[in-house]
Amino acid sequence: MTSQNILYIEASKADYKEQLEEKKPRSWLKSVSAFANTHGGHLIFGVKNEPRIVAGLADPQVQKSDAERHLHGVLAT
């Protein structure tokens, strides 16, 4: 999937977040739950929702690790 294709995924199959909100993980964990309870989807960080523009992430590897940590914490409870 190219960065240009990311911008045109159907709304029901994708949710766009400008950044990983570590202090408010529920804001994006709700999307994870919704995708898990349907036919899946894509949670795409680093993209502004309105207007849909690629904003990028300051440190994608750190944010990936943080997202995984939050997910493991939720799944372990």
Image (cartoon, grey):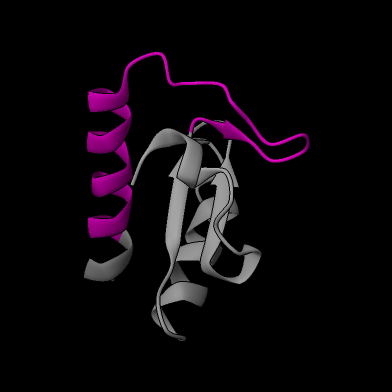
Which quadrant of the view contains residue 75? bottom left
Q: Residue furthest right?
A: 50
66 left or right, relative to 49: left
Where the C terminus falls, by quadrant? bottom left
Image location (x, y in percent) of residue 28: 53, 53
Which range is magenta? 46-73
- The answer to whether residue 1 is left or right of residue 55 is left
Magenta run includes residue 49 = yes
Position of 37 relative to 53 (above/below): below
Please tell me whether residue 43 is drawn above or below residue 37 in the rendered image.
above
Q: Please say if 77 is above or below 8.
A: below
Q: How many marks?
A: 0
Q: Residue at x 27, y 36 (%)?
A: 64
Q: Which quadrant holds residue 47?
A: top right
The percent coordinates of residue 58 (x first, y second) are 41, 13
Does residue 12 lie above or below 46 as drawn? below
- Which residue is most to the top? 58
Q: Report if residue 16 lies within the magenta region.
A: no
